[in-house]
Image (cartoon, rainbow, N blue to C red):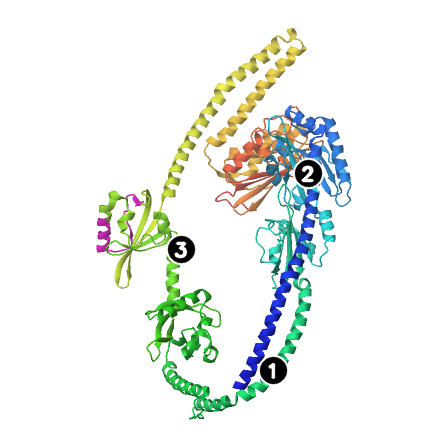
Amino acid sequence: MRFSSRLILACVALVCVTAAGVGFLMYQNLERTLVPAALEKIETEAEILAQRFGAEVGDAVKDLQTLRGATAVGDLVRALEDGQGETGALPARPRRELAALFSALLQAHPHYLQVRLIGVADDGREIVRADRRVPSGDVRVTPDSRLQQKGQRSYFAGVLATPDGGVYLTPIELNRERGRIEIPHVPVIRVAMPIYGNAEKAAVFLIINFDMRAVFASLRSSVGSPGSFYVVNRNGDYLDHPDPALRFGFDLGRRHRIQDTFPTLAENLGEGDAEAFRTVDAAGEGYALAMAPVATTLGTPAVIVIALPGREFLAPVDAVRRSSLFAGVAACLGAIVVAFWVAQSASRPVRQMASAVAAVDRNESFSLPDFGRSDLAVLAHSIERFVEQENLYRAMFESANDAVITQTLDGRVTSWNPAAERLYGYSAEEMIGKPLETVIPEDRRADAKAFIHLIERGDQVRRQRGVALPRDGRHVDVYVTISPIHDRAGKPAGVSLIVRDVTEEVRMQELIRLTVDASPAGMIVVDVNGQIDLANAAADRMFGYEPGGMIGMDIETLVPPALHEQHIQDRLAFQKSPESRAMGIGRDLHGWRADGREFPVEIGLNPVAAGGTERILAVVVDITERRRAEAEIRERTEELERSNAELAQFAYVASHDLQEPLRMVASFCDLLQRTHADKLDEDGREYIEFAVDGARRMQQLINDLLAFSRLNTRPVEPVPASADRAVQQALRNLTHAIEESGGRVDYADLPDVMCDPTQLRQLFQNLLSNSLKFHGEAPPRVKIDAERDGGFWRFSVSDNGIGVDPGQLESIFGIFQRLHTRDEYPGTGIGLAVCKRIVERQGGEIRAERGETSGTIFRFTLPVAEGVANDA
């Protein structure tokens, strides 16, 4: 570029920089005045919305406090403490009064969804519940038959941990009925208050389900800013969003968070007070964001967010900026006119020198005019000297394989050979005169400047490891040889750099290091003198040393002091005959930690050669946990054997010592009834019948308990057994029950399974007896099916009986678990527990389900019989 043109550009640049500086100061002033005011406005708006939100929750707390003082609540708490634990046994009057209070509260607060009183006992069964039906809005009181157990709900434990008179607030989530998300979706927040009894623990608790739809709609409609309105939880999950599809994604299996839109937001929101700030979205667009946590005494259930696009937020600033830009352009145009005239007059001598230098670029001889003693004469002499140096460097550098770079002491490049172009991706024209730090990573630039300062002081700088930053942004590992360039006075005038790419060499070294450090076993390399040359991170942790702390130590330091001499002999013997082997086979080995503790280890030894020197690689594994686990297994095995022996002894006592007195009681009561019936009144005969019946039931209970215990003590010896034959045997034993009930059992072609035949018959007999016993008005109908499922047969026994409440499907398999009184249905409640034990001892599983229309389905699995086709 011609000097006159440069001069023009310099003047234009000066004016432009001045205009830009003035414009920047104006823009900064606007930033300091307008932007904070706008941020404060949307921050205040978000804070007001958060306070409204918190007030709504506060109203629910006040309602709970009012209900807590109701007489009916106190009556129910006292009834529970007096032992009337079942819902149906509680006094009807206070329950009716409380139902009326709940209904009135729902009528008065359209955004209340449910009001409930839940008992702590009986797995959290509801005592009184009033609901608002969705979407009709009708209020109803839930009948006793549809009251549920809430003990497994996530909020149950939290309410119980709340002190008396305190309030528990749940997160905002979609409402669920019987474990499933309600349709249409209804966002709720639950406010609960425990009520303690005389036992100083919670007896019941009140809970209000708060329908958040009306609150969200009210807040959304009152937003005055033109931006977007969101409500999120502290994790950033959307609770309210302009797009309904993004609401409550975390509850519906398609999570959407505000951090997805604004990545700069923290993972935990709502900490601290309301704030407003500027940020960018995932697409890089600017935004003003106001966040206000909904602060309540119970925590932060949600965070109000208002997002204002940058183009709307900065509209006043942009208007002033455009006017400033117009004024700056006008000033620049005027400066160009003046600069052109000045440059033409001042640059004429320079153009003469430029013509001469152009001849140098064409490898032609050149001559410069005689400028006498003016400043231009000095410039002409400098040009001649520069050309001579350029020719010398060109001959030396262009053939070098390594990058050769020279720079001034202030860090600007003065030469750049072809190898440097290949390494860094920049041409010489791009780099000459530019700072060398352009191709040095930012975190390494301070080191580069420190090396230059050393050269300025006259110190020597040897070969150094470094990192190059080529045009494509990669980080390339290099070795740099740094040498000073002296001027004629012998003072440092610049720096010469020879840069060699060692990426592959460094990569291999790093790969080896990472592989060794990633090993879970301790790895230690020892030289022929027994000194530690290398120890990985696992070895440092195992022996209790800081990283690198074992380097240079004697290997015997890691061996218990009493074994030092023996270890030295073992090590020398290994060096004489080095081969990969385990050290100390047939005896225990121990290591010695830095804190003086001994621990058991396993050690593998391998000879290695590095740099022409033989070394030993020891792989060390800490087996402390393995030894502890082995001891624990032995101890538990012994305990199990003792327990089984005691259980067998108990079964013997139950079958002989307990049953004999019961038989005597039953016999003599029966004899008394037959021989002295005429001497007894009706009450006496009834008492004898009670005694005989009780003794017989006790005998049956002992027999069932004995049968159940034998399942634990008797060895499992599964053999191929026919399920078809087992069902036939069970039906023969149940002939009287089938005829008495008018029942029918359907089955066909049941397969062979691996099971004890007697236990298999007992399994089917117990399940069929259960179905025949618990039937309704219609005669019992039972169906048995089986289908193959991999290595198991999956059986189902379905009936049309009275069924089981869903909340009790798991508990019916417990020992002595009865759902009805003995007057309604006879039995000891141990039959299904026996079924469960038989199936699980064969490696299967059993569960109960409600039938599609009525009755119960028992499903269980048993292994496929070995060596049998089993194609049923």
Q: What residue would you read off at disc 2?
A: 61
Magenta stretch bounds: 568-591
Q: Nearer the viewer, mark 2 or mark 3?
A: 2
Where residue 452 appears, x then y in whole percent? Answer: 38, 70
Q: What residue would you read off at disc 1?
A: 336
Q: Within the magenta stretch, is there residue 585? A: yes
Mark 1 residue crowding within 10 angstroms, few (<14) / some (14–19) / many (20+): some
Can the viewer see residue 737? yes
Q: Which image quarter is the C terminus in?
A: top right
Q: Within the magenta stretch, is there residue 354? A: no
Residue drawn at point x = 37 percent, y = 38 percent: 631
Q: Amino acid at mark 2?
A: Val
Where residue 326 appears, x then y in whole percent? Answer: 67, 74
Q: What residue would you read off at disc 3?
A: 518
Q: Amino acid at mark 1?
A: Ile
| Gap between marks 2 and 1 measured at Cα | 74 Å
Q: Earlier in the sequence, mark 1 or mark 3?
A: 1
Where residue 295 appears, x then y in whole percent? Answer: 64, 45
Can the viewer see residue 778? no
Q: Quadrant of residue 532?
A: bottom left
